[in-house]
Amino acid sequence: MPKLKLITYGCQANELDSERIAGLLAQEGYELIEREEEADLILLNTCAIREKAEQKVYSRLGTFQLLKRRKKGLRIGICGCVAQQEGQALLNRFPYLDFVVGPGQLTSIPKLLDTPAKRGIATARAPGFSYPSIAPVQRRSGIKAWVSIMEGCDRFCTFCVVPFTRGRERSRPSQDIIEEIRNLERQGYREVTLLGQTVNSYGKKLRPPTSFVELLRKIDHIVDGAVRVRFTSPHPANVTEELAEAIAGLPSLCEHIHLPVQSGSDEILRRMKRGYGRDEYLEKVALLRAKAPGLAISTDIIVGFPGETEEDFQDTLGLMRTVGYDGAFMFKYSPRPHTPALEMSAQVPEEIKGRRLEQALALLNQLSLERNRAYLGRTVEVLVDREDAKGDHARLAGRTRQNKIVHFFGGGVVDGDLVSVEICGASPLHLQGELVSSQASARRGKGFDNPAAPIYDSPNRRGEG
Ligand code: SAH
Ligand code: SF4
Ligand code: F3S
């Protein structure tokens, strides 16, 4: 049996692509292995979102040069967003690289493997949704599954490579999505996360058009409370009252939204071409909180975008306080090929970006600690998954519906169980608790960990500093 070492960088879309590659190549007889020294095929599924992500790929690739010389017949391929962005340049730059495959062309991998003498490239754009079900997805987890519902992006934010690497927005027919989720439920999966770059603009281009909320309702209907449903990442401009009501009302839908803001300054948002201003974003947050008071909100933030003044940055900190984020991914702006921001004047020096990032991280720690402390003494529903213990496997771990990681001690439970845990400790990144019952209370789903006293009243009403 030929052996495949698969290395994945980047976002959930890439993780899912890797699971698809694993499934596709399993059909060709490949077995997934850990140790690259034993591999017959090494695939790097790559990310181009920031320069650092891209550099990581090159340094890892460099370590395979010797291996390739030593082992006759070893093939090395690059897939994913760096493959799409760099294309032929990769083959020119790395003589020991065998092939390059863009994210819309993963099904070409077997063909490329069939011609060992030739170096190959497949980076043509996929016109439609790129994944007819050609092979079963070989998922890493038996509990949580990623489900792609749309691909690509039409928004062209001025800092972002995604529209160039993943192409234009296209949605997957809803019958296919429903079918996949029905199967996942039958196989015993307990959580699905719907994926798309702007996931809530789903369905616009389908014939007949359908909406994201319609899809959520259908999914909620078929999983009938047995599966938790999440989605990522929604775009703030497409957050509607209907969506807020769906989050509040559909039992399967978890009370967490990851709503990337990027900046709290109107001028920077305009230069980013994000398609909303500060007030509009805050209105969406207010709408969500009004309908679904138990909602946890996380975000993405970029510091040091070209032209960002100290005042702009203070606006971002102020917005973070106003929202009171539960969590955030924060990045220093990284200039990317093909993007308009690369050419913008007033690029911010590295050391200022570094200082702003530290400041923003310090504030985030404070805010998320406050949010987490609000759970002290409460009993929450946890989906047990030791993956969340991050290496400490003696401990049980899992996530609440608000996507909070909970570490707890207790016996008689296994991964995939829904249990009740009483929270007795809080830190910025997770909660600690004690097992109350190895079965989640009958009051599962809505209302279960949203007791009458709303927890969102107190924190972060500090106004903007
Ligand atoms: N589609 C998602 C974002 C996908 S990229 C959305 O629009 O919300 C994930 C995150 O990477 C972005 O939200 C942004 O915060 C960050 N990012 C993207 N391009 C970047 C760049 N050039 N420099 C720094 N961070 C970047
Ligand atoms: Fe990139 Fe903007 Fe599209 Fe998100 S919405 S993928 S940040 S272009
Ligand atoms: Fe990276 Fe491509 Fe995802 S650039 S973040 S792997 S869409």
Image: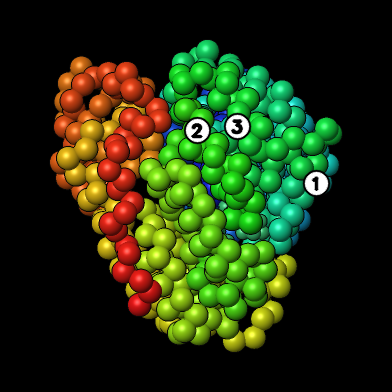
Q: Amino acid at mark 2?
A: Gly
Of the four image quadrants, the one with ligand 1 is bottom right
Q: Residues within 10 Å of mark 3 (few under 14, many from 20)?
A: many
Q: Residues within 10 Å of mark 2 (few under 14, many from 20)?
A: some
Q: How many marks?
A: 3
Q: Amino acid at mark 1?
A: Arg
Residue 273 screen position, x and y as percent: 67, 68
Q: Which residue is mark 2?
A: 249
Residue at the image point whose x is 71% and y is 52% from the top: 153
Cα distance in 3D space between marks 1 and 2: 38 Å
In terms of sequence position, does the residue under pointer 3 or pointer 2 come before the other? 3
Q: Which residue is mark 1?
A: 125
Residue at the image point whose x is 58% and y is 42% from the top: 243
Q: Residues within 10 Å of mark 1 (few under 14, many from 20)?
A: some
Residue 172 screen position, x and y as percent: 72, 33
Q: Nearer the viewer, residue 118 or 379?
A: 379
Q: Nearer the viewer, residue 418 or 110?
A: 418
Q: Which residue is mark 3?
A: 216
Q: Which quadrant would residue 380 be assigned to in this image?
A: top left
Kindly tell me whether residue 269 is visible in this rendering: yes
Q: Secondary structure at mark 2?
A: helix
Kindly tell me whether residue 24 is visible in this rendering: no
